[in-house]
Image: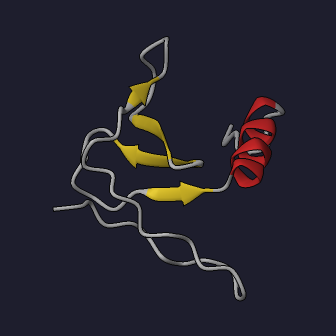
Amino acid sequence: MAESTIQHAPVGWEKPELDLSNAEWQSSSRGRGDVQIAFVEGFIAMRNSGSPQSPSLIFTPAEWGAFVSGAREGEFDLT
């Protein structure tokens, strides 16, 4: 059975239902946080490693690039 994906996509663009059952999930090389990512069919899937059965977020390469860039620039820092 395939894992479910969140389908809250912008109007006019529907994100695919990806089969993530055989995805190769990767954690941070430093082992920080609870997030894992996998590259599947040209998309990037992200999930909570503490709850891997939960739905995964699916990003296009452009969305992922914007997210990573923002994270590197401190856009999401809460302190």
Q: Left of 36 or right of it: where is 52?
A: left
Furthest-left residue in this view: 1
Splitting the image into 4 quarters, where does residue 27 fall? Answer: top left
Q: What residue is shown at x 51% (from left), y 49% (from top)?
A: 41
Furthest-bottom residue in this view: 11
Q: What residue is shown at x 48% (from left), y 58% (from top)?
A: 57
Q: Position of residue 31 (x, y in %)?
A: 42, 16
Splitting the image into 4 quarters, where does residue 25 fall? Answer: top left
Splitting the image into 4 quarters, where does residue 1 fall? Answer: bottom left
Q: Position of residue 69 (x, y in %)?
A: 80, 37
Compared with residue 15, is residue 72 higher up or lower down, i.e. above or below?
above
Q: Position of residue 7 (x, y in %)?
A: 48, 76
Q: Left of 43 or right of it: where is 55?
A: left
Q: Left of 7 or right of it: where is 66?
A: right
Furthest-front residue in this view: 41
32 and 67: which is toward the camera: 67
Q: Position of residue 16 (x, y in %)?
A: 50, 69
Q: How many marks?
A: 0
